[in-house]
Amino acid sequence: MMKNIALVAGGDSGEYVISVNSAKIIRKNLDPERFNVFLVQISQKKWVYVDNHNTEHPVDKNDFSITLNGKKVLFDCALITIHGTPGEDGKLQGYFELLGIPYTTSGLLQSAITFNKHFCNALVAQWGIKTARSIKFFKYDKPSVEDIVSKVNLPVFVKPNKGGSSLGTTFVKDTKDLLPAVNLCLEHDDEVFIEEYIQGTELTCGAYIRKGELLVLPVTEIVSKTDAAFFDYQAKYTQGAADEITPARIPDNVTKLVQETTSFLYKKLELKGICRLDYIYSNGLLFFLEANITPGMSERSIVPQQAEYIGISLKELFSDVLEETMRAG
């Protein structure tokens, strides 16, 4: 029997366009013989189903349904592709929990924790995983430059504590640039996360449950071609701005370490669906950076590259996730 899938995209952050682009790729790669796919775009202003003619149909938020030709359509599963709030921070997960609709990401609590860089790093560090030295503060409690440099050594990354795609993130080498970076960050979030820069090899590894078993994907090495010292928004979404090398050019023992750490954290954080975990490997040590519970799925995105390397097509990838989600309920 065909299943009705709500492909949920958009959101309330600066990553709206990224999310919609990911959704378009996913829609093209969902099996039309098994799934009826409905693109649902949500924002603070409206929740609508956008049909193949770009006609918008309102979503009834009371039961997350739409009405087509006088008939109510309910959904068997929500495939969440929103980057940022409300699809990555637990808000949408809580909504679907209340309605009893299966969804493809990690749960409410897990989403909220992984979206909060400070909380996630503190939790991961308790399990013996190395993280960079960092501080976090609120907009109303902004410290002086002197206070900041007394706790973390330059250079640093100044990031929104809750956000993704490196939006609002600045690499700071000089104290004179700290406050402008903080102010930019506060345009995206009311919490600032400042993290010491670790020079090394940037690595990332995806994972998801396939046929009831955790599958850890190949490791990708990221080499930015921009002036940025990290995989920033431009490098992520501009063709040719970064080299994404799968498998990573690292020794086998380092590959094993990254994949084992990814498996460990996926289980300890109680993640679900397709996730991607980012790291820096420096001087023989592996440092955890962050966990992404709704990683990008555009043509250039990393997880599809990793899956393709081991012979898993996008159609198989998304079918795997939907099947596991509906099986688990």
Image (cartoon, rainbow, N blue to C red):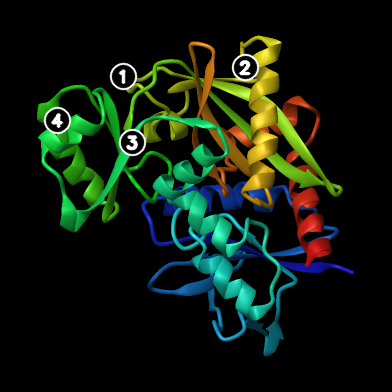
**Tag of residue 295:** none
- Vertically, is 196 above or below 111? above
Pinpoint residue 273: horizontal percent, then vertical percent. 69, 51
Q: Residue furthest bottom?
A: 70
User: Which residue, given by chain and number where applicable, does mark 4 sit on?
Assistant: 177
Q: CA distance from mark 4 to mark 3?
A: 17 Å
Q: Give the mark nearest the N terminus, 1 or 3.
A: 3
Which element type, helix, strand or loop, lies under badge 4? helix
Circle 2/circle 3 CB separation < 8 Å: no
How far, Cα to Cα, is label 2 from label 4?
33 Å
Q: Tag 1 or tag 2, which sits nearer the N-term? A: 1
Residue matched to label 3: 134
Taking the image as drawn, is residue 239 in sight? Answer: yes
Q: Position of residue 311 (x, y in %)?
A: 81, 29
**Mark 2 or mark 3, earlier in chain:** 3
Q: Earlier in the sequence, mark 4 or mark 3?
A: 3
